Image: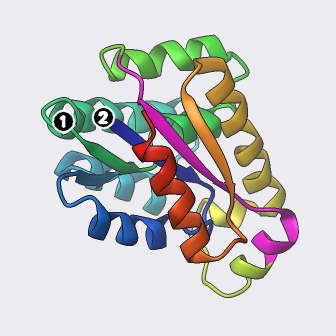
Amino acid sequence: MYVILEGIDTAGKSTQIELLKQEYKNAVFTKEPGGTNVGKTIRSLVLENDIKSSVCEMFLFLADRAEHYKRVVEPNDFVISDRGLVSGIAYAMQNFDDLEMLGNLNKLCLDGKLPDKVILLSLDKDELNTRLSKKSHDKIELRGIEYLLSIQENMIKVLEFLGIDYVVIDAKRSVEGIFDEIKSFIDKS
């Protein structure tokens, strides 16, 4: 089973991943971008350089996704990933309005295999503002709250377009409540 935990920055993905590691000891845990050595290099390229071309940025992330799929997802029976193609497409939609093209490029990177389940941790504007005010910002977060909220909206559009089994969870809920809902969603057949 291939499960992706999605959400914009500060939604609580890292906290939930740590809890999931305790629950699903038979799963391989990974992340995108950066789940492989190649991915770490690509992540560094994107976040630490002033890339002007949105096409360049998109193809760097696609390269990471293709390598990640071959090295981590394909060889394992149960993978839980911190981010994946849903956020990849959602971010690319800020610059490209062809969802079908973006979907096809990402499917190519995954040899046509979409994730089995996606969990989307969702934040409202006030909660996002509160959480962002408590931390320093990376290049993506510096693009602003409205930018991040539009990414979150795009994630739902992507999930509906691709027809992936998904659940949206309010990230303001208690850590335990969120974890219980995630676990229930993963375990249902």
Residue 128, compared with residue 92, is above or below; it is below
State if disc 1 and disc 2 touch (CB < 8 Å): yes
Kind of residue at badge 2: Met
Observer-nearest of 37 and 13: 13
Q: Residue under circle 2?
A: 1
At a point 47% along the width and 59% down the height, the residue shown is 47
Give x and y (percent) for residue 100: 62, 11
Give x and y (percent) for residue 6: 54, 49
Q: Is residue 62 left or right of residue 120?
A: left
At a point 43% along the width and 45% down the height, the residue shown is 186
Observer-nearest of 139 and 185: 185
Q: Residue under circle 1?
A: 77
Mark 1 Cα within 10 Å, few/some/many (few <14, many 20+)?
Answer: few
Residue 156, compared with residue 41, is above or below; it is above
Residues rendered magenta in the picture: 113-129
Residue 185, compared with residue 49, is above or below; it is above
Mark 2 Cα within 10 Å, few/some/many (few <14, many 20+)?
Answer: few
At a point 15% along the width and 37% down the height, the residue shown is 76
User: Is residue 128 shown in magenta?
Assistant: yes
User: Is residue 122 shown in magenta?
Assistant: yes
Residue 122's tag is none
